[in-house]
């Protein structure tokens, strides 16, 4: 079935460090790919998305590129801030349904 | 624009008791979803409504879980009787329905954290 595997956490970084969270997906159908973020005490929010191969999603300094050849959608940010501390979820959709990875907790220290 | 509303935010019950959660989606969103998020896992879809009809309830444990969306707006999710393993955050999400799009962005509520003792 449809599945998403993402890097296990937790990840702890210093401010201004480079962040990457790996995500791979099963290649059935033609999924759209997403990163969702959950800040402490808040609901899930869409961070970025890509709907076809080679698309790059970007938002708030985060980027992820839809790589069909490696079935990957890794999330990157060049310089993290304390406010980026959150849980990040990779997800894929097919036929209007979302399948989520387990989530990666990121903590950024000042 | 108001977001997806859920209540209560927290609920603690004993096993074998019943519990109900309420969701009010964003106005005009035809599609409503209930997810279960167990600690350390990603959300898992329980049921999807399109207006007041069920589109997908394949992962809903129907012996104890039920959900309804009678007027195609608000929805309730009920667990009866609850088990220890039902402890989780229950998320409601809603989306527009745009025919022909393979995905319509889902907007999530803050969730209800259920603890079963």
Image (tube, rainbow, N blue to C red):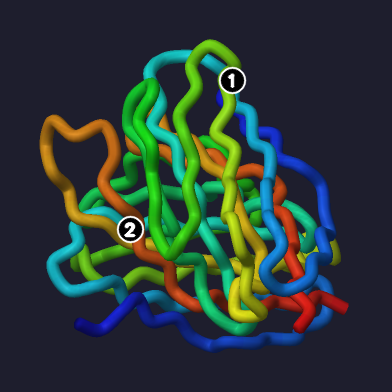
Q: Percent from the top left, x then y, of residue A102?
A: 71, 48
Given residues A74 and A99, the one toward you in this image is A74
Q: Which mark is residue B32?
A: 2
Given residues B8 and A47, the one toward you in this image is A47
Q: Residue at x 35, y 76 (%)?
A: B4
Which of discs 2 and 1 lies nearer the camera? The answer is 1
Q: Percent from the top left, x then y, of residue B103?
A: 29, 39
Q: Percent from the top left, x then y, of residue B85?
A: 82, 59
**Dot 2: what SS?**
strand
| Visible residue check, residue B93 | yes
Residue B86 placement: quadrant: bottom right
- Look at the image and tell me in which quarter the C terminus of chain B lies: bottom right
- Look at the image and tell me in which quarter the N terminus of chain B lies: bottom left
Count of residue discs: 2
User: Left or right: where does residue B89 sit relative to residue B3?
Assistant: right
Given residues B78 and A64, the one toward you in this image is A64
**Dot 1: what SS?**
loop
User: Left or right: where does residue B12 sit relative to residue A10?
Assistant: left
Count neighbours of disc 1 (C-alpha within 10 A) and say few if under 14, some if 14 to 19, many if 20 or more: some
CA gap between label 2 and label 1 equals 25 Å
**Pointer 2 indicates a residue of which chain?**
B
| Visible residue check, residue B81 | no
Q: Which mark is residue A26?
A: 1
Q: Percent from the top left, x then y, of residue A78?
A: 59, 56
Q: Residue at x 44, y 81 (%)?
A: B6
């Amino acid at each position: 079935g449809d599945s998403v595997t993402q890097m296990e956490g937790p990840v702890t970084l210093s401010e201004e460090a480079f962040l990457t969270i790996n995500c791979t997906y099963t290649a059935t159908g033609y999924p759209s790919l997403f990163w969702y973020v959950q800040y402490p005490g808040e609901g899930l929010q869409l961070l970025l998305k890509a709907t076809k191969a080679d698309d790059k999603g970007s938002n708030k300094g985060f980027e992820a590129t839809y790589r069909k050849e490696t079935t990957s959608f890794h999330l990157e940010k060049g310089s993290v801030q304390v406010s980026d501390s959150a849980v990040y979820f990779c997800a894929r959709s097919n036929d209007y349904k979302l399948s989520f990875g387990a989530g990666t907790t990121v903590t950024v220290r000042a | 624009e108001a977001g997806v509303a859920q209540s209560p935010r927290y609920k603690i019950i004993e096993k074998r008791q019943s519990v109900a959660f309420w969701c009010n989606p964003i106005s005009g969103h035809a599609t409503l979803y209930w997810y279960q998020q167990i600690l350390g896992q990603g959300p898992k879809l329980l049921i999807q409504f399109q207006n007041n009809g069920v589109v997908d309830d394949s992962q809903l444990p129907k012996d104890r879980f039920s959900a309804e969306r009678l007027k195609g707006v608000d929805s309730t999710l009920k667990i009866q009787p609850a088990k220890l393993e039902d402890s989780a955050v229950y998320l409601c999400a809603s989306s527009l329905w745009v025919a022909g799009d393979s995905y319509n962005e889902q907007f999530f509520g803050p969730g209800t954290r259920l603890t079963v003792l």
